Image: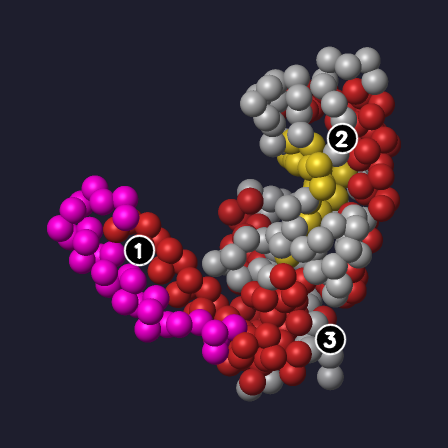
Amino acid sequence: MTTVAEVKRWTRPILAEHPDLVLEKRDLYLKPLRHIYRAIEFLGSSQRTFPTPTARFGVLFAPPSVQMSHSMGLDLPVGYSTDPHFQALLESETRKALDGTLRRLDTIEAFYELTREDNLIWRVLCTGLSWSPMLQAAVLVALGKFPEARQVTTAYIEQANEPALRAALASGQALLAKRSRSSDAKYRISDATTFLKRLSDVRLLDAGAQANDRSGLAALLRIWEQERVRRLGIEHLWEPTPFPLERSP
């Protein structure tokens, strides 16, 4: 697997070229780090000499029950680290990712505009925000677009089968009580718990939007953002700023 020391060595000239980047272990974060996460990640691979740097972005204030990103990211084709042109390729592909997309995602408004339709980001399918209703609802709420947000939240709530989820949770708990090592029981509990939490998060957004509770929703999104930043270990890079809904009349 790619080591932290290797990432540090490879990214030294990149950091010198791009002062708005900062390296944290295996991740090159794009500053300022406010509501939108933008980074080049070196997650490593099964082969040490075949790193897989990936450009990723996501919503820091996303509901905690869902992934921050709705995109799988863009792998940068840099080849093997033993190739003679590896460093030049890495620098070139990083430059393309930064200038082509990541730097453009500097505000919630920009993020929304670039994810309103598929293919707007990297010409990749499934990067439209509608592919992730929970993220879509959170972004619309953050923008103060409450009617649009409620269209998303009410549809999500209506299609969720809460009785079935609670029945699955109960059956899993009952099975686990009989068979403490049952993987099936643990799966039922985990799956039902996850979807029930997502439903709960969506209902919080829906209730706030319905009541036009701007201060309450801003506080909720800020809590979610702070929790995610803390979990990522990047509080020292985070710049807390108001949400667009707080600037709206």
Residue depicted at x 60% and y 84%: 212
Mark 2 or mark 3, earlier in chain: 2
Residue 123, position in %: x, y? 79, 50
Which label belongs to residue 247? 3
> Which residue is label 1 attached to?
189
Magenta-tinted stretch: 156-184
| Secondary structure mostly seen in the magenta stretch | helix
> Which residue is label 2 attached to?
77
Q: Are marks 2 and 3 in contact (CB under 8 Å)?
A: no
Q: Rate crowding at label 2 as few (under 14), some (14 to 19) or many (20 or more) other CA atoms within 10 Å.
A: some
Mark 2 or mark 1, earlier in chain: 2
Q: Is residue 161 magenta?
A: yes
In the image, what residue type sits under mark 2? Pro
Q: Is residue 231 magenta?
A: no
Mark 3 or mark 1, earlier in chain: 1
Report how far apart the C-alphas of labels 2 and 1 lie in the structure.
40 Å
Q: Which is more toward the observer, 184 or 195?
A: 184
Report how far apart the C-alphas of labels 2 and 3 lie in the structure.
41 Å
- Report the mark closest to the observer, 2 or 3: 2
Residue sitting at the far bottom: 211
Considering the image in quadrants, where does the C terminus appear?
A: bottom right
Q: Which is more toward the observer, 177 or 140?
A: 177
On screen, residue 71 versus residue 186, left or right, reads right
Among the 4 quarters of the image, the one containing residue 144? bottom right
Q: Rate crowding at label 3 as few (under 14), some (14 to 19) or many (20 or more) other CA atoms within 10 Å.
A: few
Visible residue check, residue 240: no
